[in-house]
Image: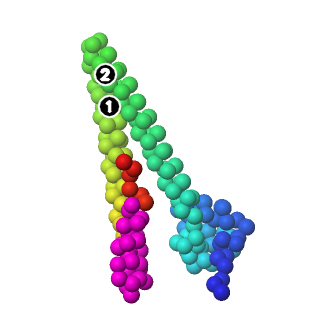
Amino acid sequence: MPRRCTVCAHRDRPAIDKAIIGGSPLRRIAMDHGLSESAVRRHASKHLPDALVEAAEAEAIAAAGDLIARIEKLHREAVDLLEHAGAERDYRGAAGLLREGLRSLQMLATIHARLEATERDLEAAVTREVDVALDRLEAEFRHEPGILERALRAIAAEHAPER
């Protein structure tokens, strides 16, 4: 009979899960909660609820979206003020506002580039995981010809968009 995960059974499991998701060093988490680092590592890779990871990712995406919206608002305000300064022939003020407008555009470009890179990294990781899972399935069912193809067709049919 397999041993029970010491982290899953720990009274501070929610705090441990939160620390893992938050990126705290596993060694520090283990020391703080009287666990072995290997137990925390196993728990993080095998037992950490997917919902918590997805929630943390969704929260990060929402925060990035909020930041982008605030920068875009500041950029629009800078452009409005720039137009006003130009109409008033306040060239010194217009130059400062133009610099601020360019800074906000640079921040937006940097954030968008990082989000795109993260999306590509996530897509590559998912693809690797799917490939590993398919390899395992093929190895497991190699003695039953066609079963993997039938299973994949059934899954695809189940998730196909309705017409």
Which of the pair 137/57 is nearer the observer? 137
Q: Is residue 25 above or below residue 137?
A: above
Tag 1 residue: 101
Crowd band around label 2 with a 10 angstrom C-alpha radius: few (<14), some (14–19), many (20+):
many
Label 1: state its secondary structure: helix
Which of the pair 109/122 is nearer the observer? 122
Taking the magenta stretch, the answer to whether it contains residue 2 is no
Question: Which residue occupies 67% across, 76% down?
Answer: 6
Q: Which numbered tag is attached to residue 12?
A: none
Please identify the quarter of the rendering in which residue 90 is found.
top left
Q: Is residue 94 above or below residue 37?
A: above
Which three-letter amino acid code belongs to the residue tagged 2?
Leu
- Give the dominant element type of the magenta stretch: helix, strand or loop: helix
**Outermost residue to the right:** 11
Please identify the quarter of the rendering in which residue 78 is found.
top left
Question: Which residue occupies 31% across, 40% down?
Answer: 106
Does label 1 or label 2 sit earlier along the sequence?
A: 2
Taking the magenta stretch, the answer to whether it contains residue 143 is yes
* Residue 135 visible within the image: no
Which three-letter amino acid code belongs to the residue tagged 1?
Gly
Question: Which residue occupies 56% across, 59% down?
Answer: 51
Tell me the magenta residue range.
129-157
Tags 1 and 2 in contact by the CB under 8 Å rule?
Answer: yes
Which of the pair 126/35 is nearer the observer? 126
Give how far across and how far down residue 87 sits, in percent: 27, 13
Tag 2 residue: 82
For the residues marked 1 and 2, what is the alpha-carbon distance in whole angstroms?
9 Å
Give how far across and how far down residue 144 sits, in percent: 39, 84
Question: Which residue occupies 60% across, 60% down?
Answer: 18
Give how far across and how far down residue 67 sits, in percent: 44, 40
